[in-house]
Amino acid sequence: MSDVYEASADARSSAFLRSLSEYQALYERSLQDPQELWGELAKQFHWQTPSTGPFMQSNLNPALGRVSVTCMAGATTNVCYNLLDHNISENRLGDKVAIYWEGNCLGDSRKLTYQQLLNDTCRMSNVLTNQGVKKGDRVAVYMPMIPELVITLLACSRIGAVHSVVFAGFSADSLAERIMDAQCCLLVTADGFFRGEKMINLKQIADDALDRCREREKGSKGFSEPKCIVVRHLGVAPGGPGVPNRPYTPAKRPCPNLQTPWQDGRDLWWHEVMHKAHEEAPPVWCDSEDPLFILYTSGSTGKPKGMVHTQAGYLLHTAVSHRLVFDLRPSDVYWCTADIGWITGHSYLVYGPLANGATCLLFEGIPTYPEVDRFWQIIDKYQVTLFYTAPTAIRSLMKHGNEPVLRHSRHSLRVLGSVGEPINPEAWHWYHRVIGGGRCPIVDTYWQTETGGFLLAPMPFATPLKPGSATFPFFGVVPAILNEHGEEMKGEAEGYLVFKQAWPGMARTIYGDHRRYEETYFQKFPGFYFTGDGCRRDSDGYYWVTGRVDDLLNMSGHLLSTAEVEAALGAHPAVVEAATVSCPHSLKGQTLYCFVTLQAGHTFSRTLVAELRQKGKIMRRILRKIASGDPDFGDVTTLADPCVPSALFADRCRTT
Ligand code: WT7
């Protein structure tokens, strides 16, 4: 194999893991005695009561009974307490910066130390409690990338409430569907935000969603309309700027004319309720397997699946994998560009890094505003050392050439990361050579919303890298490649990617539908977790994920269901039938190819294409999902192309 990259002896010398054989030895240990290795790793955290059982217990075979996974049975802890209180008291991180916030507009920034983050989180915990939120209750979160979003998640964790984050680019329909599915008792949102030049009136969309919930749940007992807490982010702040200790993040570019719809009795301003709340709140101790959060991901039947993640295993998996795969040092400045609306933001922007006491950068904007060099400018401004982004973002910036990159030094960079889809060799080399100046290893991390944390990933200074391969399994993770008959193939092989045993961070169920969980992940190959991905193992044992083999496709790092798109197209009155398949796309990885049969009397026209694209409500929801906003919205945190809808349909639809 010619295209292999190894770290220099110098770079290796100070890393956690320095050679492939060191990785292999530790990997073997993780399988032979999980208790010993994970038990040791668990010592960095606070356990209110220790675990009484083996490190992991599981049944992955539906024929043998209910599929279940338990990690550290009997232990109690609190994730928020570990991230904040424990890091402050045990590791003396009170004055360390937890979050650098960089707003959409140049010059808009804020920083929070671990102590400040704890104070605000405690206030918010009290706010939630005052609103009647109890352990186990679900809280919907629909917010831009501002510190209050992190504070809200941590506050939920502190009182044992279960957060359900809905990406702020999703429509009112998507939000309503998710609020109802999890029967959320409270919604936390913001008045609005800017993505580049575009203003999003978030509270208006949130109100539409709450209206929809009310309509659909009319008459059904047991559903009461959620309360709504609103961060004033774009609106003009009361008391003007410079109010001491203001517990909210105002944008530099306020919108005095922003119309924020309001319903007295239901809606509450964040700054008002926070102001009245106490700054101390005791953590609520949770069982190791109590739910921590729900996060929805596309399902091949269309209805999104609310993946449920739990406490102890998720905390350990995200923290340990983040530390080792990024070779985290106390002085690092870590930046993950993913939105917290996705699992990457949950695991590797909030939970993993903060558990490790890292300094994290939270960026509200997009890589192309005000100019296409924004990422590189931010890297220099904060001296970012660890940078984690998606191939789709790299490809979209690559097309602007090297000049915007070379305007900035980027000398602080140490490790680069990639996630969301296979990274093509061209993008890999540009990322490595131009962005990283040839100095920085690229950790290609393979995982899923369902897996909670990395399953396949290199150790940056130990694993020789092959562009496009996520290399080898993480500790405690056992991959296998199966053929159509479910037989395991050894050595060089290509087939279905499965995992042979449970790992700490995996999702434990689908909210309210455990049967669907069993059917989706464990029915096809009983006893194995089925990823839905195809994969090849080469003669050196490297894994190469080739992409989805089910009815999902991966567009710009986001999963879409073909069934859902077909249903949306079919809802148009001119359409009899629609069939959708994926096809390769140079920028987005994959795109959709739609075949549409029209009703008699209808002809194919530009207008019809435009209608399919814009008119139908469900279609709009799909398009939002695809474009992560709307066509102009361009959520380029992990998705960069504002012309997705036209790529979907322009000269692609055919009448038959
Ligand atoms: C699907 C999961 C995990 C966070 C982002 C996406 C694809 C993800 C890689 C990678 C090849 C990858 C797979 C997977 N995928 N990372 N490094 N190499 N493919 O989370 O939305 O749950 O999507 O993304 O197809 O199944 P998700």
Image: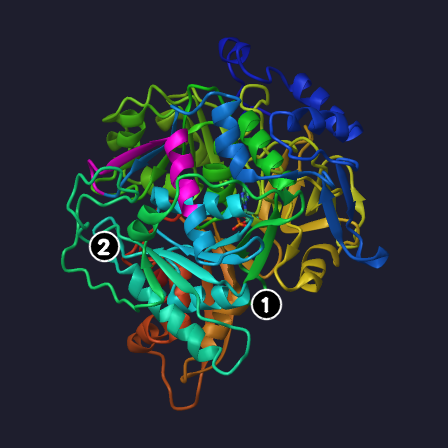
Q: In which quarter of the image is residue 106?
A: top left
| Residue 109 belongs to the span the image colors magenta | yes
Question: In front of the other: label 1 or label 2?
Answer: 2
> Which mark, residue 301?
1
Q: Give the residue drawn at x 46%, y 64%.
A: 593
The residues bearing labels 1 and 2 have C-alpha atoms spaced at a distance of 33 Å
Q: Position of residue 294 (x, y in %)?
A: 55, 54
Front in this rendered view, residue 125 or 98: 125
Q: Can residue 655 be seen in this view?
A: no
- Residue at disc 2, secondary structure: strand
Disc 2 marks which residue? 198
Q: What residue type is labelled 2?
A: Lys
The N terminus is located in which quarter? top right
| Residue 502 belongs to the span the image colors magenta | no
Residue 149, relative to residue 333: is it above or below? below
The residue lying furthest to the bottom in this view is: 601
| Range of magenta residues | 105-124
Q: Name the side, left or right, on which 302 lies relative to 571.
A: right
Q: Where is residue 612 in the image (x, y as percent from the top left)?
A: 37, 74
Front in this rendered view, residue 136 or 494: 136
